[in-house]
Image (cartoon, grey):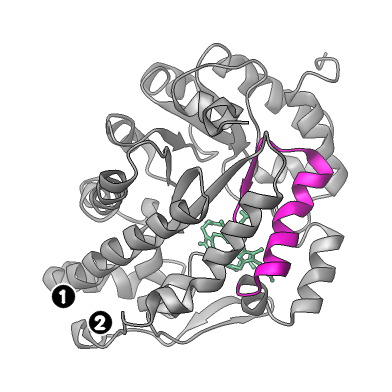
Amino acid sequence: MLSKDKTLIRVLSGESLQPPPIWLMRQAGRYLPEYRQTRKQAGSFLDLCYNPELAVEVTLQPIRRYGFDASILFSDILVVPHALGQKLWFVEGQGPKLTALENAAAVAQLDRSGFHDRLAPVYETVRGLSQALPAETALIGFSGAPWTVASYMIEGGSSRDFATAKLWAYKDPSGFSQLIDLLVEMTAEYLCRQIEAGAEVLQIFDSWAGAWPADQVIKWSLQPILAIVRAVKAKHPHVPVIVFPKGVGPNYIAFAAIEEFDGLSLDSSLPLGWVKDNLAGKITLQGNLDPLLLVSGGDALAAAVDKILEIFAGTPFIFNLGHGIVPQTPPEHVAELVARVRGQVSKAG
Ligand code: CP3
């Protein structure tokens, strides 16, 4: 099957499909028993990311179970700082830890020379997937956006308020820009390599874009993402890009207006009526079921799914969550969701 005939790629080029294509952020992960088993076999989470054979296996697991329309490369956004020589490890129950970058001098010491060699196993995973996936399943490559990745590099891990990273940007914007610019350049190269290995669509995750006041969202989220997309499209003009600026509220309008972006992934906080009035018809939209509805299941899930399907009917749309699947999700609720989106069950009351 040609890549342009896959449902995900058709909607990203502006077609509306009924039923819409569906895939879920974090569709491979701890909610699946087979993932937990493969992860144990790999050793650590990072060992799994850098083991092409096992990374291909965990990417395929949710495709086998649910037949999603798209598959997302199994890796993590933090392999980029790791490939720049920053120390990275994952602590069970706490998430990622990095040796925090403190200033522009530390940015200058990051090592770009070994970047693609360190990421070679990720490129091999993409090549393996493009061989192994069913013909109708689109392959999504991804990266973090510069701001979200920089926040982990500066905070040394997850953060509640991003105080250290934001204060750096406010007090020393030119030093902070050196880090953002480096991430723009290296992320664009990283995404081009994923395309050259077989990725057919890209998604750029700016999970913490909502940490900024509205004007700063443009400067530190939208503009760096746009610089990446322009650099990627200069080489690969036909590969569609989905952008996920989580939490930016009314600034979603600014993202929807960017011609270079093909899809916009919506978080669960956006009111559907507002989305319909302000975003629908401007760009292909993706989202935005609350991941906790997938944990609850039942009538609450069914009603929310039907409402999303109704609002987006007749517009170019991809069914997804508003953020990643959480580990406590019962796998059978995911099966129910897919059946409902595909119209294989009767509508709620
Ligand atoms: O199936 C997929 O979506 C593909 C794989 C994927 C992972 N991380 C695997 C993962 C993708 C696309 C990501 C992106 C990612 N990673 C983001 C952006 C999207 C988002 O969720 O906001 C961010 C912020 C990260 C950084 C990260 N990685 C954190 C904060 C954590 C810890 C939280 C957690 O869920 O444990 C991770 C770990 C991680 N990345 C896991 C997985 C499957 C869990 C690791 C494990 O097996 O223990």
Task: Give, as a three-letter code, the residue at label 1.
Answer: Gly
Which is the main secondary structure of the residues drawn in magenta?
A: helix
Looking at the picture, tell me which residue is in the foreground, 127 or 250: 127
Whether 249 is drawn above or below 273: the answer is below
Where residue 194 sits: x, y (%)?
A: 47, 57
Say if mark 1 contacts mark 2, CB within 8 Å. Answer: yes
Looking at the picture, tell me which residue is in the foreground, 110 or 269: 110
Q: Which mark is residue 270?
A: none
Q: Residue at x 62, y 71 (%)?
A: 49
Task: Give, as a three-letter code, the residue at label 2.
Answer: Val
Quadrant where the N terminus is found in the figure: top right
What residue is pinned by disc 2? Answer: 107
Quadrant where the C terminus is found in the figure: top right
Horizontally, is 83 left or right of 185 in the view?
right
Q: Is residue 56 magenta?
A: yes
Q: Secondary structure at mark 1?
A: helix
Q: Is residue 44 magenta?
A: no
Report the Cα–Cα distance between label 1 and label 2. 9 Å
Looking at the picture, tell me which residue is in the foreground, 281 or 349: 281
Whether 33 is drawn above or below 117: the answer is above
Where residue 290 sits: x, y (%)?
A: 63, 40
Q: Which residues are magenta?
A: 50-73
Q: Which mark is residue 175?
A: 1
Where residue 202 sits: x, y (%)?
A: 46, 46
Q: Is residue 162 visible?
A: no
Rate crowding at label 2 as few (under 14), some (14 to 19) or many (20 or more) other CA atoms within 10 Å. some
